[in-house]
Image (tube, coloured by chain):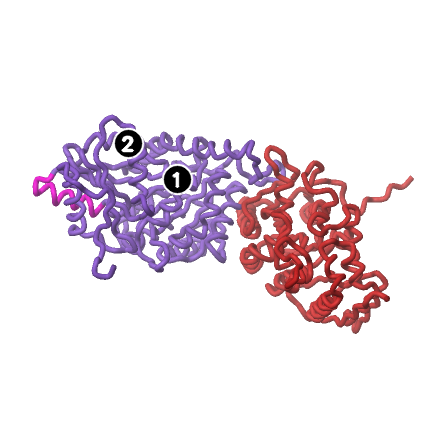
């Protein structure tokens, strides 16, 4: 009987026994990311282990390296919250001098990347270090107890953006770090999601194989911070793609005229011109994504806030060069 | 053959780095230490130093990159001063806690506000609790030598702590003095290759560095930094002795000058030690029994040496270019702690002077001497004295 090759290596670098919450989408993301990295290293250098990880302080750091245990089967270093990119720069420089073949993976959450680590990230990308920076985006400071970050979406409840008489929840649109990264004209930038694991693995492999810096922003669910059912993480992440909330795209060499937009699925109609996506007519309303999460519960009492979010999502797609139609749910 | 030439302390620090052969240097320009990375980038550009020079976007990233490189197992170097060192503050603790023997050359400079680029020691003194070893150079030769010594001590397996070497802004950083550049071969023999057994990021031997420690383990990790500082006392003496044997220049944690029959000993650090030695000569000519002592090593604090010094005088007059608010200077605290339980001890008088690059003149030292003499004669005196204040603008 023929045995089908597994879609991604069975090697593990993020070992069982870490202390992440049940249903943690980011744990899934790191496991897949390191597997993809390993495959890329095997293909590029003939050595599946040829990488090291520099990680920012954050939930995925504290759950994986509680002395005297570790969840990491790869060389791994954590220093502080805001400097994973700078630490990775140092590791990469040291490896260069040691003549060690391989690539450095820097990992940070949205707080450690979009906010406090933005300067170090920009420096690392601009200096062209041979590092892949993976931003796991669970859209708030989950490690410290669900405070808003600049990557928190409009309308979301967090402990520092609580809805109230004078508040709708988070009142600013989400910051798109992938576009900022792409502005450095680096070889490879992508957004990904645990809702499309094969695509995520493909992108991580691609990122790991380029020469020079790469940036991948992966959307991953947080049942604790999103107040969502433990078992629905992948489903929720997929709904973010299918409703237009989370765009999947790739930008190579900072070429904003040639952003590769991916079809979202979920029955969406994609219009192309010369192979390029110019419009998407989504079929699933964003409400389908929102309603599974307690963090957006209050929005359903103020539908105009959801309309506001719809407008922001349209504006974000416009930056990507795509006109989108976002339906309202049927009455 | 060693080369005898003239150079600024910044160049001497760059030369020390070149001789130590770090594999990674990460630096961000800041006055007055800018010339250090400039000179190193020249060495790298000319192929005289085979290293990666990371032109980082901030001092925070400079030290972070050094931590990354050191965690990967290579010798690293950076230079900074003042606000730059302050920006590194958070990571300085981490470098010590992770036991990474990084060396920083610091052009000692005042901290804002008001912004001031000139010399005092507040920048490094403010980092005294980070766990880093601290050395202070009196002149440009010492700036070079102490950086080599700092590597040797920092990388010793009994120590494994980062180290900073301070040399005064402009008084040394920008002043040309005779300096002997030691033979590369001798330096290679002295330092050897850095091959850490505790810090490496090698896929063939994966380890986890920089973990989270619960209350069950954190305190022990801090104690190990304490213990390493304690161990450094002995290691520093050994390294000083080896350095003297190899290079012919003698270093001591506390260097004494005309202390044998002194009633008052002026204690200071850095370039001020040179001024004070001159001043002691000047007073001795007048028959006044004074001596000088220079703190070459500030962390670990040389407790035994301070106790020995204290036996020699009736008054210790501390001359400090730093302030610990409401207490005095940092040395005043350290000396008090060191002598508090001694049966016989001298009176300690603290002098804060020369902040923000204010010149310290013989006139200022006369002012300090007068107060120290009051203490000597059993008259009333102030424990903490600001010397050379311009009262008309207060």
Q: Is residue A239 above or below residue B163?
A: below
Which residue is under mark 2?
A: B339
| Magenta stretch bounds | B274-288
Secondary element at image label 2: helix
Q: Residues within 10 Å of mark 2 (few under 14, many from 20)?
A: some
Residue A128 shows in the view: no
What residue is shown with label 1?
A: B133
Q: Which chain is red?
A: A
Above or below residue A92? Residue B314 is: above
Q: Which chain is purple?
A: B
The correct choice, above or below, for A90 with respect to A1 in the image is below
Which chain is mark 1 on? B
Residue A331 located left or right of residue B139: right
The residue at 76%/63% (across/down) is A244
C-alpha distance separating marks 2 and 1: 22 Å
Whether tag 2 and tag 1 are in contact, CB under 8 A, the answer is: no
Where's residue B341, x and y in %? 29, 28
């Amino acid at each position: 009987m023929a045995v089908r090759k597994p879609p991604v290596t069975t090697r593990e670098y993020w070992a069982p026994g870490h202390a992440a919450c049940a249903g943690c989408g980011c744990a899934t993301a790191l496991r897949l990311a390191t597997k993809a990295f390993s495959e890329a290293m095997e293909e590029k250098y003939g050595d599946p282990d040829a990488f090291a990880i520099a990680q920012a302080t954050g939930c995925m750091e504290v759950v994986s390296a509680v002395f005297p245990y570790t969840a990491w089967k790869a060389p791994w270093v954590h220093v502080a919250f805001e400097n994973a990119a700078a630490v990775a720069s140092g590791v990469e420089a040291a490896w260069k001098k040691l003549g060690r073949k391989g690539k450095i993976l820097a990992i940070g959450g949205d707080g450690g990347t979009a906010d406090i680590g933005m300067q170090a990230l920009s420096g690392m990308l601009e200096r062209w270090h041979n590092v892949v920076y993976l931003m796991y985006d669970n859209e708030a400071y989950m490690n410290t107890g669900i405070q808003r970050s600049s990557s928190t979406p409009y309308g979301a409840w967090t402990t520092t953006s609580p809805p109230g008489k004078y508040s709708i929840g988070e009142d600013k649109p989400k910051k798109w770090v992938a576009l900022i990264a792409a502005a450095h004209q680096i070889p490879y930038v992508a957004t990904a999601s645990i809702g499309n694991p094969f695509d995520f693995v493909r992108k991580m492999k691609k990122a790991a194989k380029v020469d020079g810096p790469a940036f991948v922003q992966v959307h991953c669910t947080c049942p604790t911070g999103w107040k969502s059912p433990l078992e629905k993480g992948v489903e929720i992440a997929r709904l973010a793609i299918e409703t237009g909330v989370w765009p999947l795209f790739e930008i190579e060499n900072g070429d904003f005229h040639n952003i590769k937009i991916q079809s979202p699925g979920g029955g969406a109609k994609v219009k192309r011109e010369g192979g390029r996506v110019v419009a998407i007519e989504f079929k699933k309303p964003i409400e389908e994504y929102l309603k599974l999460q307690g963090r957006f519960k209050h929005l359903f009492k103020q539908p105009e806030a959801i309309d506001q979010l719809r407008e922001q999502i349209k504006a974000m797609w416009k930056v990507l060069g795509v006109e989108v139609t976002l339906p309202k749910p049927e009455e | 053959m060693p080369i005898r030439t003239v150079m600024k302390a910044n160049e001497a620090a760059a030369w020390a780095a070149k001789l130590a052969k770090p594999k990674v240097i990460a630096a961000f320009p800041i006055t007055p230490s800018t010339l250090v990375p400039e000179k190193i980038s020249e060495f790298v550009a000319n192929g005289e130093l085979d290293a990666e020079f990371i032109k980082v976007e901030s001092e925070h990233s400079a030290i972070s990159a050094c931590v990354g490189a050191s965690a990967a197992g290579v010798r690293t170097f950076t230079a900074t001063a003042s606000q730059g060192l302050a920006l590194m503050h958070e990571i300085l603790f981490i470098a010590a806690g992770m036991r990474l023997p990084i060396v920083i050359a610091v052009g000692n400079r005042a901290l804002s506000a008001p912004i001031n680029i000139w010399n005092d020691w507040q920048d490094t003194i403010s980092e005294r609790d980070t766990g880093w070893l601290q050395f202070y150079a009196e002149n440009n030769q010492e700036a070079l030598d102490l950086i080599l010594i700092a590597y040797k001590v920092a990388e010793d397996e009994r120590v494994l702590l980062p180290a900073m070497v301070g040399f005064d802004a402009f008084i040394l950083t920008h002043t040309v003095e005779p300096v002997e550049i030691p033979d590369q071969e001798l330096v290679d023999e002295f330092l050897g290759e850095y091959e850490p057994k505790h810090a490496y990021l090698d896929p063939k031997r994966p380890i986890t560095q920089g973990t989270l420690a619960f209350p069950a383990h954190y305190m022990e990790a801090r104690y190990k930094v304490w213990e390493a500082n304690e161990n450094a006392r002995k290691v520093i003496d050994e390294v000083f002795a080896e350095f003297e044997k190899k290079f012919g220049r003698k270093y001591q944690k506390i260097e004494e000058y005309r202390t044998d029959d002194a009633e008052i000993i002026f204690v200071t650090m850095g370039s001020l030690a040179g001024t004070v030695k001159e001043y002691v000569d000047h007073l001795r000519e007048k028959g006044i029994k004074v001596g000088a002592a220079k703190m070459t090593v500030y962390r670990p604090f040389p407790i035994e040496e301070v106790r020995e010094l204290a036996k020699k005088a009736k008054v210790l007059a501390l001359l400090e270019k730093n302030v610990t608010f409401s207490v005095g200077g940092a040395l005043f605290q350290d000396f008090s702690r060191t002598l508090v339980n001694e049966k016989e001890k001298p009176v300690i008088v603290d002098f804060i002077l020369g902040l923000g690059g204010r010149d310290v003149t013989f006139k200022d030292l006369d002012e300090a001497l007068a107060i120290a003499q009051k203490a000597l004669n059993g008259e009333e005196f102030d424990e903490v004295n600001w010397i050379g204040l311009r009262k008309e603008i207060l």
